[in-house]
Image (cartoon, grey):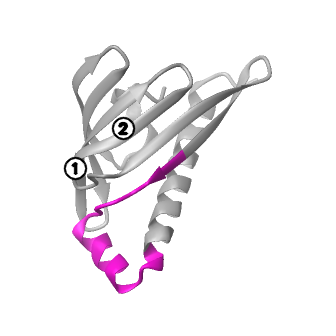
Amino acid sequence: MLLNVDKYKDISSDVKKTEILNRIANTMLTKFEIESPGGSTKYTAKMEFNDKKILINIVDGDLKGSSWTWTVLPYGKNSSYVIYSGRIRNYTFFIDKLIKKDESMDVAVNVSAMIKTIRLNKSYVEKNYSIP
Protein backbone atom coordinates (compact mmCIF):
# COMPACT_ATOMS: atom_id res chain seq x y z
CA MET A 1 0.00 0.00 0.00
CA LEU A 2 2.79 2.46 0.86
CA LEU A 3 4.30 2.07 -2.62
CA ASN A 4 1.00 2.49 -4.45
CA VAL A 5 1.35 6.26 -4.79
CA ASP A 6 -1.66 6.47 -7.11
CA LYS A 7 -3.81 5.60 -4.05
CA TYR A 8 -2.38 8.44 -1.90
CA LYS A 9 -5.33 10.65 -2.94
CA ASP A 10 -7.63 8.04 -1.36
CA ILE A 11 -5.66 8.23 1.90
CA SER A 12 -5.66 12.03 2.17
CA SER A 13 -7.62 14.76 0.42
CA ASP A 14 -4.51 16.96 0.86
CA VAL A 15 -2.77 14.97 -1.90
CA LYS A 16 -3.54 16.86 -5.11
CA LYS A 17 -1.24 15.09 -7.57
CA THR A 18 1.13 12.13 -7.80
CA GLU A 19 3.14 11.18 -10.86
CA ILE A 20 5.63 8.33 -11.13
CA LEU A 21 8.51 9.65 -13.23
CA ASN A 22 10.62 6.51 -13.22
CA ARG A 23 10.57 3.06 -11.64
CA ILE A 24 13.52 0.70 -11.93
CA ALA A 25 13.78 -2.41 -9.74
CA ASN A 26 13.52 -1.22 -6.10
CA THR A 27 13.72 2.52 -6.79
CA MET A 28 10.95 4.92 -7.77
CA LEU A 29 11.12 8.63 -8.57
CA THR A 30 7.76 10.34 -7.95
CA LYS A 31 6.41 13.92 -8.12
CA PHE A 32 3.93 15.06 -5.47
CA GLU A 33 1.69 18.06 -4.96
CA ILE A 34 0.24 18.38 -1.45
CA GLU A 35 -2.17 21.07 -0.25
CA SER A 36 -0.62 22.89 2.70
CA PRO A 37 -1.02 26.19 4.60
CA GLY A 38 -0.11 29.05 2.30
CA GLY A 39 -0.42 27.07 -0.95
CA SER A 40 0.60 23.78 -2.49
CA THR A 41 3.81 21.98 -1.60
CA LYS A 42 5.46 20.45 -4.68
CA TYR A 43 8.39 18.05 -4.51
CA THR A 44 10.07 15.04 -6.09
CA ALA A 45 10.78 11.99 -3.94
CA LYS A 46 13.24 9.18 -4.53
CA MET A 47 11.79 6.04 -2.93
CA GLU A 48 14.08 3.06 -2.35
CA PHE A 49 12.49 -0.09 -0.97
CA ASN A 50 12.76 -3.74 -0.10
CA ASP A 51 10.35 -6.10 1.66
CA LYS A 52 10.96 -4.50 5.09
CA LYS A 53 11.84 -0.85 4.55
CA ILE A 54 11.02 2.17 2.40
CA LEU A 55 13.52 5.05 2.37
CA ILE A 56 12.18 8.32 0.98
CA ASN A 57 14.45 11.25 0.18
CA ILE A 58 13.15 14.51 -1.25
CA VAL A 59 15.53 15.32 -4.09
CA ASP A 60 13.86 18.40 -5.57
CA GLY A 61 11.23 21.00 -4.78
CA ASP A 62 9.80 22.64 -1.67
CA LEU A 63 10.95 20.01 0.82
CA LYS A 64 14.36 19.25 -0.68
CA GLY A 65 16.59 17.62 1.92
CA SER A 66 13.68 16.05 3.84
CA SER A 67 13.58 12.30 4.42
CA TRP A 68 11.23 9.63 5.74
CA THR A 69 11.54 5.94 6.56
CA TRP A 70 8.82 3.30 6.83
CA THR A 71 9.92 0.03 8.46
CA VAL A 72 7.62 -3.02 8.56
CA LEU A 73 8.29 -5.66 11.23
CA PRO A 74 6.32 -8.93 11.38
CA TYR A 75 4.19 -9.39 14.48
CA GLY A 76 2.50 -12.71 14.94
CA LYS A 77 0.92 -14.69 12.12
CA ASN A 78 -1.12 -12.02 10.30
CA SER A 79 0.09 -8.69 11.66
CA SER A 80 2.94 -6.24 11.43
CA TYR A 81 4.33 -3.28 13.27
CA VAL A 82 4.93 -0.24 11.11
CA ILE A 83 7.53 2.27 12.26
CA TYR A 84 7.54 5.71 10.64
CA SER A 85 10.24 8.31 11.12
CA GLY A 86 11.38 11.37 9.27
CA ARG A 87 12.57 14.94 9.16
CA ILE A 88 10.97 17.76 7.19
CA ARG A 89 13.21 20.51 5.85
CA ASN A 90 12.75 23.53 3.56
CA TYR A 91 9.09 24.20 4.24
CA THR A 92 6.75 26.37 2.24
CA PHE A 93 7.12 30.13 2.68
CA PHE A 94 4.30 30.41 5.25
CA ILE A 95 5.59 27.69 7.57
CA ASP A 96 9.19 28.84 7.12
CA LYS A 97 8.22 32.30 8.46
CA LEU A 98 6.62 30.72 11.56
CA ILE A 99 9.74 28.69 12.30
CA LYS A 100 12.04 31.70 11.92
CA LYS A 101 9.98 33.49 14.60
CA ASP A 102 10.00 30.51 16.98
CA GLU A 103 12.38 27.59 16.41
CA SER A 104 10.27 25.28 18.58
CA MET A 105 7.71 25.41 15.76
CA ASP A 106 10.09 23.20 13.76
CA VAL A 107 9.52 20.35 16.22
CA ALA A 108 5.78 21.06 16.32
CA VAL A 109 5.47 20.92 12.52
CA ASN A 110 7.49 17.70 12.27
CA VAL A 111 5.60 15.93 15.06
CA SER A 112 2.15 17.02 13.85
CA ALA A 113 2.98 15.95 10.26
CA MET A 114 4.12 12.52 11.47
CA ILE A 115 1.00 12.03 13.62
CA LYS A 116 -1.32 13.07 10.79
CA THR A 117 0.41 10.73 8.33
CA ILE A 118 0.23 7.77 10.71
CA ARG A 119 -3.45 8.38 11.51
CA LEU A 120 -4.43 8.74 7.84
CA ASN A 121 -2.63 5.52 6.88
CA LYS A 122 -4.04 3.60 9.86
CA SER A 123 -7.57 4.72 9.00
CA TYR A 124 -7.13 3.77 5.33
CA VAL A 125 -5.81 0.30 6.19
CA GLU A 126 -8.62 -0.34 8.67
CA LYS A 127 -11.27 0.63 6.09
CA ASN A 128 -9.79 -1.18 3.09
CA TYR A 129 -8.04 -4.27 4.39
CA SER A 130 -9.23 -7.20 6.45
CA ILE A 131 -7.83 -6.70 9.95
CA PRO A 132 -8.05 -9.85 12.12
Label annotation for residue 108: none
SS at circle 2: helix
Question: Which amino acid type is marked by label 2?
Answer: Lys
Residue topped by disc 2: 9
* Position of residue 20 measured from the top left corner of the image (x, y, whole percent): 24, 27
In the rendered structure, the answer to whether residue 79 lies left or right of residue 12 reads right
- The picture places residue 96, in percent across and down from the top left corner, at 29, 72
| Residue 92 within the segment the image draws in magenta | yes
Task: Tell me what residue is drawn at x 56 percent, y 24 percent.
Answer: 52
Toward the right, the furthest residue is 76
Give the amino acid type for the residue marked by disc 1 in the picture: Lys
Task: Tell me if residue 53 is in the magenta stretch.
Answer: no
How far apart are labels 1 and 2 at the CA level? 15 Å
Residue 125: image x %, image y %?
Answer: 58, 32
The quarter of the picture where residue 31 lies is top left
What x and y, as percent, mark residue 68?
A: 44, 44
Determine whether, in the image, residue 124 is placed left or right of residue 87: right
Name which residue lies at 44% across and 25% down. Answer: 49
131 in relation to 66, above or below: above
Q: Is residue 76 left or right of residue 33?
A: right
Residue 99: quadrant of the picture: bottom left
What residue is at 72 percent from the left and 25 percent from the top? Answer: 79
Against 24, residue 19 (above or below) is below
19 vs 63, nearest the viewer? 63
Q: Give the residue pinned by disc 1.
A: 42
Seen from the viewer's position, the closer of residues 36 and 92 is 92
Look at the image and give the residue range highlighted in magenta.
85-105
User: How many labels sit on residues?
Assistant: 2
User: Which secondary structure lies at badge 1?
Assistant: strand
Give the foreground label among 1 and 2: 1
The residue positioned 35% from the left and 86% from the top of the image is 101
